Image: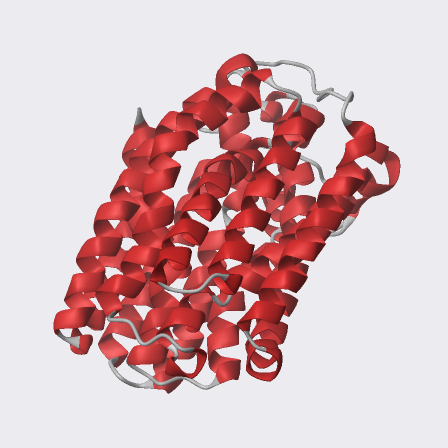
Amino acid sequence: MLDSLRALPGGCVETLGLVFVVLIAVRVFDAAPWQKATLVAASSFGLLLSLFPVQLVRRRGWSVNVTTACLWCVAGAALAVTAIGGRNMQVFLPFMVFALLCITLSIPLMSQIYRKHYPDNSRGRLFAFTGVVRKASALIVAALFGRMLESNLDNFRWLLVAYAVGCVAMAACVLGMERTYLRRANQIRLFGALDHVVHDKVFRQLLTSWMILGFGNLLCFSLFVEYISNPAYGYELEAFTIAFITGSVPEIMFLIFVVGCGLAFDRVNFFIVRIVLNVLFMAGILIYFLGNGVWALYIGMGLHGVGRAGGNIAWSLWVTKFAKGEQVAEYMSVHTFLCGIRGVIAPYLAFPAIALFGPKAIGMVGAGLILIASLMLWPNMRIKGKAAATPVEPDPRAS
């Protein structure tokens, strides 16, 4: 119940990284390419550092809930500073990067909460229902905030205030959940979780494929807003239209398909699900960047939105199929750490590359990488997740 309630402000906050941070940078600040790349990569900086909060929580014996809530409150404070700073890029850039970094640092910790509170045999379905609430919220927020920016660009400050309040509301919800703890260890190696890559062959193969998939997807994802907001690439759409295409269209498709994707996650071989999602991402990218006319933008983002519906579930929960109970946060921290590496690199390549080679070339390269990642998964089609089902876990501090 509380996680569904948390999804309401969570959907609002989600639109910041997906749409509005770049839109504000382009329309309000006329940001330089390196500044836009830094803002897009900000969340990935948090993923890159995500190994460390998990190990720190284990070392200190802190509650996962309290640590997560603290990160979100700090992010809210940073967003409040960006709102106060107004049209000052020297304030907006560092504090926005810091806020997005703090939000993403919580991801491995939330995976442990999902592992405890969502039973193994229905985890995908339950997470999908929460996703419906989150995406419905994001859909409404994207449309409303797009209208606000279109009417007056100075309204961006009110958007930032709303995002700050959303972070605090998420923190309040997670504090209300039953406390979750990681197994405490007196001696922790900061990179100790990477041992799982060495010893777990299937995990290693999945990470390699996901690295290639993610890089191709992020290369294109970084440019979805830039491509149709920068007149240099042939489109000069209104702020509301940009927000609707890149924000609302994929969220609508997410809402339609997410429950079915959750059921598929619970019942269908994970590798089959992953390959189908990859095909949807690939098709959406090709149509978006290679198609002609606004219709191609809608169709491309629609297909990408269907891919996101399943991709969100797979990305957030897949380690629960392959990691044992108390290792979920560590497995997820390795996954997010590698996501951070590609997420930091991709935007800094994407913005100069689209200027040099054009959007069509970027779309083809991104789709090609996703195809390679899909082919790498094919030999593992008969493998199933091996994690033991443990619907209720004891408090690890007792041992």
- Total of numbered circles in the picture? 0
Q: Residue at x 77, y 41 (%)?
A: 375
Q: Residue furthest front?
A: 292
Depth check, front residue: 128 or 110: 128
The answer to whether residue 355 is above or below residue 22 is: below
Depth check, front residue: 205 or 85: 205
Q: How is the image coloured?
A: secondary structure
Depth check, front residue: 165 or 311: 311
**For residue 90, what is the image quadrant?**
bottom left
Q: Is residue 354 visible?
A: yes
Q: Residue at x 50, y 55 (%)?
A: 287
The spot of residue 79 in percent (x, y) is 32, 66
Q: Is residue 62 visible?
A: no
Q: Residue furthest left?
A: 151
The spot of residue 309 in percent (x, y) is 45, 37
The answer to whether residue 47 is above or below residue 386 is: below
Q: Which quadrant is home to the C terminus?
A: top right
